[in-house]
Image: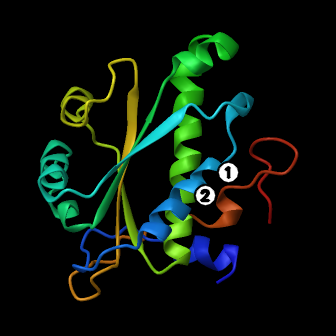
Amino acid sequence: MGVYETIKSRKTIYSFLNKPVKEETIINMLDAARFSPAAGGIHEYEFVVVMDKDNKKKLAQICLTPNIDGAPVMIVIMCDPKKLINLFGEEGESVFCSANAAMAIDNIMLYATDNGLGTAWISNIDQVAVKKLLDIPENYIVRGIIAVGYPSEEKSKDYTISPPRLKDMVHEERFNNKAE
């Protein structure tokens, strides 16, 4: 599948088959994240890969998303904003730490989609509880959890939201000069 088709076919999946994801695929997803753009060229994000059944269940409860514990893999994305503050000041934490992590998350999800996997990006996170469960240092900020696995076609709902029309989003030269 080409990049454009992969982007258009990605959707959120909350129900997964009880089928393991190959270690090589997990490594490649994380490697794809490593190649995402990053403000200042600083890749301050890191990952915790969770495959233990009990830990996945606890994460699902913490995130108030009970269905995701059926995913064979959950990837927790966190960043250390201190690595960006020296270069960007407060925006390093408030803007660029989130943006860098979001781009890495997107690369993971697109790689997964291109390889027949489904994903759900969970952003409703209790920072304290997730950090405690996974022994994440206090100075890190958890930016998301991605549930990854093979979609269960019979149980999954299509959570794809139709995007707005392009002509409603594009302005030519200045705001409110809509493209036709």
How many numbered marks have been drawn onto this rendered protein structure?
Answer: 2
Instruction: Give SS at disc 2.
Output: helix
Question: Is there any visible trace of residue 68 in the rendered image?
Answer: yes
- Which residue occupies the foreground of this view, 178 or 37? 37
Q: Give the residue displayed 63% in from the left and 79% down from the top.
A: 5
Q: Residue 46 appears at what percent x and percent y?
A: 48, 38
Circle 1 SS class: loop
Residue 132 x %, y %: 20, 29
Residue lying furthest right in this view?
173
* The C terminus: image quadrant: bottom right
Q: Which residue position holds label 1?
A: 35
* Name of the residue lying farthest toward the bottom: 154
84 is higher (above) or lower (below) than 175: above
> Label 2: which residue?
32
Return the x and y of residue 69 as percentages of the image width and height: 18, 61
Asked if residue 153 lies left or right of residue 140, the reply is left
Q: CA distance from mark 2 to mark 1?
A: 5 Å
Q: Residue at x 69, y 15 (%)?
A: 87
Dot 2 and dot 1 residues touching (CB under 8 Å)? yes
95 left or right, relative to 178: left
Q: Amino acid at mark 2?
A: Ala
79 lies above or below 82:
below
